[in-house]
Image (tube, coloured by chain):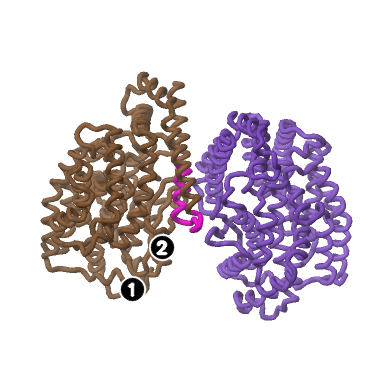
Chain colours: A purple, B brown
Amino acid sequence: MKAYGELIQRFKDARVLDSVGAIVGWDQHTYMPPSGAAHRAEQMGFLAKLGHRMVTDPRMGELLAEVEASPLVKNPESDEAVNVRGIRRIYDRAVKMPPALVEEIARVTSQAQNVWAEARRRSDFPAFAPWLGKVVALKRQEASAIGYKESPYDALLDEYEPGATAAEVTAVFAELRGELVALVAAITSSGKKPRRDILTRDYPVDRQHVFGQAAAAAIGFDFRAGRLDTTVHPFCTGIGPGDVRLTTRYDAHAFNQGFFGILHEAGHGIYEQGLDPAHFGTPRGMAISLGIHESQSRFWENQVGRSRPFWEHFFPRARQTFPGTLDDVSLDDFLFAINDVERSFIRVEADEATYNLHILMRFELEQALLTGDLDPIGVPGAWNEKFKQFFDLAPPDDAKGCLQDIHWSMGGLGYFPTYTLGNLNAAQLMEQARQDIGELDDAIRTGEFGPLKAWLNQKVHRPGQTYMPRDLIRRVTGRPLSHRPLLTYLRRKYEPLYAI
Amino acid sequence: MKAYGELIQRFKDARVLDSVGAIVGWDQHTYMPPSGAAHRAEQMGFLAKLGHRMVTDPRMGELLAEVEASPLVKNPESDEAVNVRGIRRIYDRAVKMPPALVEEIARVTSQAQNVWAEARRRSDFPAFAPWLGKVVALKRQEASAIGYKESPYDALLDEYEPGATAAEVTAVFAELRGELVALVAAITSSGKKPRRDILTRDYPVDRQHVFGQAAAAAIGFDFRAGRLDTTVHPFCTGIGPGDVRLTTRYDAHAFNQGFFGILHEAGHGIYEQGLDPAHFGTPRGMAISLGIHESQSRFWENQVGRSRPFWEHFFPRARQTFPGTLDDVSLDDFLFAINDVERSFIRVEADEATYNLHILMRFELEQALLTGDLDPIGVPGAWNEKFKQFFDLAPPDDAKGCLQDIHWSMGGLGYFPTYTLGNLNAAQLMEQARQDIGELDDAIRTGEFGPLKAWLNQKVHRPGQTYMPRDLIRRVTGRPLSHRPLLTYLRRKYEPLYAI
């Protein structure tokens, strides 16, 4: 069908342009010389404008309408139907946004990020408050423009997690919360502590790089079709078929940051490499959501990477790679150290258990911001109150409190819950993988990750956007997303470690 | 004036897109993972198509006509007049080319390059001959489409060296040729030879990198606004204000290749960094020609970089950087070695004197190809005959003969003469710089390159495309381009070295 062909070609062109932007963005965070920043901003702005123009071209709307009325999309699981649904989602969202609002959001969040960075540096929330106010007001306008049934939050969440609603997320988070708080309390009052110094000894950066790269390759990241570089804020970017890039950062006295950072990004990268190259540039060959993407990074970082079988394989290698550093450390010591649980102030440094509490409180706060129940100026007070509830701690200042994350300054309201959705998805997928594959730990123990990667490829990666996130999880695991697998996983891990 | 503003904005947009392509191209030759090649080709093709569409938009033609008829461009040296002339040149060239021809040239040269690479590997000219035939036929069509007064060669040369003609280049090359051949003959029959082993000793790559980068910074390349990376075929790319990238390649037993390669690319980079950032994206802020660009690379690589004062400063530093390697070498030994002259087969490995002979013979051959006087199948015979004339040598095979360069396979007929134009320009500019600055050698001897760089910035870089290449040289040096400065320079250097 001719209209379908033209629709796909136009959409693909926009995606090729996106993939050019991905290189430009990667370069900005890895190799761009400092003085290149101003021109880089101009390039990025130009690409964004051009990309938006391509996607919102009125011809796209005509073609969509024509194809949607045709028999081509009758079977909802056909490639054509998947593509048309996916393009429709992106097109509708794009055309609903008035260009003036798009530009204003870009302008304000660009400035707000600079103000935020400076405010965090000086722990000066009042300096940031008016900008947070502007961002929230604009995101409220965005939610109105996009439209929603129940909550304006739904309109924002949908950008990151298609089809998800605040109500649905609230329900699963509520179930998680009670038991998780109790588990963390049991752990922290157990009196048991790992030998933490193990992870802050000498880990020369060049050896961390070799060790991390070898582990990423072992779990299945293809370095002929990818790279690993260093940056300030680690990320993974899929440029296109055969080109997926990981970044990490190293500290010669912090093993976790570099190594688990690499496993995390490699998980994202394996998802990108697992998309169907024949469908590149169309929804059928695109990742479905941040919550599914994050499930893949957490899967390898935590479900696999912090497990005993994984270290039965890698611990002897770590000892060889860092001579002398781990001589007096047993596998048990090491496992306990990398699974240390402690209430702390900073989300990105949090362990597997407390991490989700950081997300839960942000999810509540940003909903209140959006509905207007929370005035931006009241954020520090509300933050500290919630922190007391969730962690029984008082942040020493706003830099270690409500100013720690960049997300709100960049307009990313609705983004936070996808992190915990990722953790929930990862646990539920791992439960299913254990059933489907069998003897999984034995394979991992011998450094054999092929079957697990193949399972993820087939079940999660190759479908692209064939299923909405919630449907994908239900199809693969046979039940809807639940808090249960994550809690079961955390209990099984921590109860023996902390003798609870 | 509104039309001028719109014209500039449209042209700038196309240039911003070009600058995005420059990053993508740089990445391709530095960090792209091997499996990314196919998608990269798609990205590059897409950007080229889009850029061509932007430049040839009919609205550009309307705007040009309107502005050209206005008083805004009355003063031919005004920024407006310079920009309108420059845009007109690019627009006319672009719209004269039928899109089908553009596509066919892209397709054929892309394949021809692969065939050439394989033919060179096997020294199999007959395999390449039909592709050379196709390329020549297409370039003849291109010349017809572009139009010319005297020779089809002019239409091709004009792309690289605006305003230059084959007749004009032939005249200056003819004057160069006789004396140059005689000089080379005198040198090679002098019986004197430098100690060549000096340059093939141990030069560890990491130290070459440090040494070369320090030299590039010393002569004035700003590394806050640029980088140096490694690649297979070195190049320099100007991405935009504040971002200019050099690449080089190292061989642990070839000092010249790495070091003079860096100086050469740094010369290109200093030109790019010297363009007026306020005029980025318009002809007023763009390099004027390959012949002027090459003059800047040759200026620093040869005029400065192979001079005694330069090494009076750097030789002690080289000794420190490569401990032990140069202990038994005097400054005189070293200078003689880096100024070794020898007839050889490969252009890119040639010295300053014989290099131009390689260009002269290519210039003659490609004119004959274009007029039809030389059939592509006859290239090896014609090549070897000319090589005998110019060098009194017979290439052992076509790989070391007519198959050595990529240029013809990529459709670059008309490109070669800009290399020798660069050498001529560089020598003439240096003569003038010596007069204008005074005590130049004393400054260089103490590592002070600021005045020289400032002179080039002011005279050559900042004007952008204000003057055509030939006018720029005449304005800066007070006379038209001549073979005399280069010959005088070569004589002054080689006569004492070879006791001629």
Q: Given the current orientation, which residue lies at the most extreme bottom position?
A: A328
In this picture, residue B149 sits left or right of residue A200: left
Which residue type carries mark 1?
A: Thr
Q: Mark 2 points at which residue?
A: B209
Quadrant location of the N terminus of chain A in the rendered image: top right
Q: Residues within 10 Å of mark 2 (few under 14, many from 20)?
A: many
Q: Can residue A381 be seen in this view?
A: no
Which chain hosts label 2?
B
Point out which mark residue B108 bears. none
Separation of residues labelled 2 and 1 (CA atoms): 16 Å
Magenta residues (range): B18-36
User: Residue at position x 57%, y 43% from top?
Assistant: A15
Q: Residue at x 27, y 32 (%)?
A: B147
Name the secondary structure under disc 1.
loop
Main secondary structure found in the magenta portion? helix
The disc numbered 1 marks a residue on which chain?
B
Q: Examine the image and state in which quarter residue A347 appears.
A: bottom right
Relative to A494, is A244 above or below? above
Give the camera-side residue of A294 and A186: A294
Crowdedness of circle 1 by 10 Å Cα count: few (<14), some, many (20+)?
some
A181 or A482: which is nearer to us?
A: A482
Q: Is residue A105 magenta?
A: no
Residue B352 x, y percent position in the rendering: 23, 56
* Tags 2 and 1 on a common chain: yes
Q: Where is residue A497 in the image (x, y as percent from the top left)?
A: 82, 71
Q: x and y percent of residue B80 in the render?
A: 38, 27
Which residue is outermost to the front?
A: A71
Instruction: Provide the residue designation for mark 1.
Output: B325
Does residue A383 appear anywhere in the picture?
yes
Amino acid at pointer 2: His
Q: Is residue B31 magenta?
A: yes
A112 horizontally vs B379: left or right: right
